[in-house]
Image (tube, grey):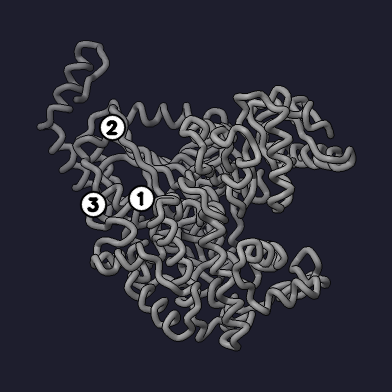
């Protein structure tokens, strides 16, 4: 964690001193940074030269020298309260008076560490997730005495590293993500102890039926059973026997070659989709939703930050508050109450805030109110949109942690953006993906496996709403454009990509075919042979080939993407809006009609436009040799 955080800071342009207690540990950390930077450079994901970044990194074993000129110190010692307090006290004695001292702890209270210093108001938590170079989330934690300006500085620092912070407003052990994630791993283990599930049944159910990236036992093995047990024990929380016994036997998961699964032969988890039948997944998710409700009710974080944290830090397909609203908070409460009555276990005691929501009738999406207000369609979790003064509606698929893979909710949000847009104000729509790795890498397959048939029909409607939108639409493609990403692209009017983009329909490798018009729009665009090549083989093609085939309007160098899109958009925005609307309608309706009918549509459109103000302005501008001003 320490060398990963140092690498991020150096990449962002900061001068960094890496300090550890022994020379070989310091050197190992430096070597890890050097190796990682070279790997990033090989993949084209490093803006700077690796040597230039390394020039900003110094190493030492002398703590006083390391922090003598520091603006910010990030402690990343092991999760031992006494050890961390000792480090905080030493840093406090040596660092400048205005330096901020931050801890990367994942479970200890910032306030307890800050008490070892004479500057508790300048101490905070910066909980990076492992590995820092890949994980996007950082929990910024305010201790009891942390001042607002320190929190704001910490939030700004995280953003300067190109990471996403969430503000943990109250200093509770384990903060947000680990508090909500722990029941996923713990409850399944309690069920295993009671003979109510098997390891493979629980993992298969949570992955294939509920869409989680890992099952609870697989996740325990991944993180280390000793870490789970230690975190529970330091707060005097009980540890399931199935975990405690493995820790005692030193079967800690992947790192020891044996945990709930065996890893010595490289086999690991071996559950199949059919293994997950009859598992009580609601018992697990009710506890997770309950924990989220406790955090929200106690003012630790708001639902949006809880959900962002669970997506970016926990790798969940959607936030836990959003999942609770879908399940129904009344069903969650009923499950908890029945378990609490049957066992008396404290972990099932319903959070006050959950009870308040249900008693108020705010039971979730179906009721129109839960953690979120759904009266106007609900919040936007995965899609950012903004309308500029000149009428450009920018729509960004904001799920970079999954290469902007589309969930059912994501399609719904795109459709809501378009349906709520006032076309009198919109002149052009530009779609793009967050980050520089993918426009969209396709559909979130695990999520679609759990979707209802009606939800899948909504996906087709969402893509059709792009195709039928009255104003011109532009796909701005950087990185992967696969599956659902290609289907959205084909529904757009103009398609511009970077030369290193990859275009394809890989659904056949999953035993599926493209949906959302992915076969029919493609065959009309490039013909039967090329469509069959893309669909049958499932192999993506280069942007240059996609341009040659007519899928793309342009394939340009990465540095020219913004300017090229801007040129197209400028022409559209400054053009005659009525004529553009009619042109789009005639082109799209005509291609599915006979030539005679299509020519009739064209003639009708031409005749209609002869009566418009835009046509009068266009002719007048031509006659007077000036640029037209289409208002």
Point out the tag, 2 or 1, that comes first from the N-terminus: 1
Give the SS element for disc 3: helix
Point out the tag, 3 or 2, that comes first from the N-terminus: 2
Residue in the picture at 39% in, 61% down? 322
Residue 380's disc is: 1
Q: Nearer the viewer, residue 85 or 19?
A: 85
Give the SS element for disc 2: loop
Q: Give the residue pinned by disc 2.
A: 391
Q: Residue furthest left?
A: 611
Mark 3 vs mark 2, CA separation in Å: 36 Å
Residue 227's disc is: none
Crowding at dot 3, Cα within 10 Å, few <14 / some 14-19 / many 20+, comes out as few
Residue in the picture at 83% in, 38% down? 26
Q: Residue furthest bottom?
A: 195
Residue in the picture at 86% in, 38% down? 27
Could you tell me residue 441's position as x and y percent?
53, 53
Crowding at dot 1, Cα within 10 Å, few <14 / some 14-19 / many 20+, comes out as some
Q: Give the residue pinned by disc 3.
A: 596
Residue 186: which quarter of the image?
bottom right
Q: Nearer the viewer, residue 470 or 101?
A: 101
Q: Quadrant of the C terminus?
A: top left
Could you tell me residue 361's position as x and y percent?
24, 67
Could you tell me residue 218's position as x and y percent?
65, 70
Left or right position of 146 against 389: right
Front disc: 3 or 2: 2
Mark 2 vs mark 1, CA separation in Å: 21 Å
Could you tell me residue 155's position as x and y percent?
51, 36
């Amino acid at each position: 964690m320490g060398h990963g955080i140092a690498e991020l800071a150096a990449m962002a342009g900061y001068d960094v001193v890496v300090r550890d207690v022994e020379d070989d540990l310091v050197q190992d950390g430096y070597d890890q940074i050097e190796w990682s930077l070279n790997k990033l450079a090989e993949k084209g994901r490093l803006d700077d030269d690796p040597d230039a970044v390394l020039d900003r990194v110094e190493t030492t074993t002398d703590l006083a020298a390391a922090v003598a000129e520091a603006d910010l110190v990030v402690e990343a010692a092991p999760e031992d309260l006494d050890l961390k307090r000792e480090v905080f006290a030493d840093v406090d004695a040596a660092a400048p008076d205005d330096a901020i001292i931050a801890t990367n702890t994942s479970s200890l209270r910032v306030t307890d560490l800050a008490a070892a210093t004479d500057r508790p108001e300048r101490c905070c938590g910066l909980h990076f997730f492992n590995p820092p170079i890949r994980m996007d989330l950082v929990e910024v934690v305010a201790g009891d005495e942390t001042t607002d300006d320190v929190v704001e500085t910490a939030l700004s620092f995280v953003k300067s590293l190109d990471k996403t912070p969430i503000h943990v407003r109250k200093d509770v052990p384990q903060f947000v993500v680990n508090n909500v994630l722990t029941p996923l791993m713990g409850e399944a283990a309690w069920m295993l102890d009671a003979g109510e599930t098997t390891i493979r049944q629980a993992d298969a159910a949570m992955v294939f039926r509920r869409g989680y990236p890992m099952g609870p036992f697989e996740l325990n093995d991944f993180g280390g059973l000793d870490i789970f047990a230690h975190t529970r024990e330091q707060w005097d929380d009980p540890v399931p026997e199935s975990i405690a016994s493995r820790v005692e036997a030193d079967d800690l998961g992947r790192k020891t070659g044996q945990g709930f699964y065996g890893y010595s032969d490289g086999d690991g988890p071996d559950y199949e989709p059919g293994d997950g039948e009859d598992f009580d997944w609601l018992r697990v998710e009710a506890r997770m939703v309950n924990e989220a409700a406790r955090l929200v009710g106690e003012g630790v974080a708001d639902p949006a930050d809880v959900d962002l944290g669970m997506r970016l830090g926990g790798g969940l397909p959607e936030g836990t508050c959003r999942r609770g609203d879908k399940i129904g908070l009344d069903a969650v409460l009923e499950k908890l109450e029945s378990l609490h009555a049957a066992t008396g276990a404290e972990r099932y005691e319903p959070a006050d805030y959950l009870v308040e929501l249900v008693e108020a009738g705010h039971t979730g999406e179906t009721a129109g109110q839960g953690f979120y207000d759904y009266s106007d369609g609900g919040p936007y979790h995965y899609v950012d949109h903004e309308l500029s003064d000149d009428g450009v509606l920018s729509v960004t698929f904001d799920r970079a942690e999954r290469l902007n893979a589309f969930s059912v909710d994501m399609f719904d949000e795109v459709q809501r953006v378009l349906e709520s847009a006032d076309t009198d104000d919109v002149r052009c729509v530009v779609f793009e993906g967050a980050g520089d790795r993918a426009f969209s890498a396709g559909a979130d397959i695990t999520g679609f496996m759990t979707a209802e048939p009606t939800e899948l029909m909504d996906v087709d409607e969402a893509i059709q709403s792009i195709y039928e939108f009255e104003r011109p639409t532009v796909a701005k493609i950087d990185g992967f454009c696969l599956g659902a990403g290609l289907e959205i692209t084909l529904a757009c009017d103009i398609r511009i990509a970077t030369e290193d983009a990859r275009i394809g329909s890989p659904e056949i490798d999953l035993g599926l075919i493209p949906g959302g018009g992915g076969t029919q729009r493609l065959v009309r665009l490039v013909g039967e042979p090329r469509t069959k090549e893309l669909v049958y083989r499932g192999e993506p093609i280069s942007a240059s080939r996609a341009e040659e085939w007519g899928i793309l309007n342009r394939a340009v160098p990465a540095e020219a993407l913004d300017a090229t899109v801007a040129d197209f958009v400028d022409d559209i925005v400054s053009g005659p809006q009525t004529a553009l609307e009619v042109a789009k309608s005639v082109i799209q309706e005509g291609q599915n009609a006979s030539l005679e009918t299509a020519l009739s549509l064209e003639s009708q459109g031409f005749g209609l436009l002869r009566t418009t103000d835009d046509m009068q302005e266009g002719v007048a501008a031509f006659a007077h040799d000036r640029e037209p001003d289409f208002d």
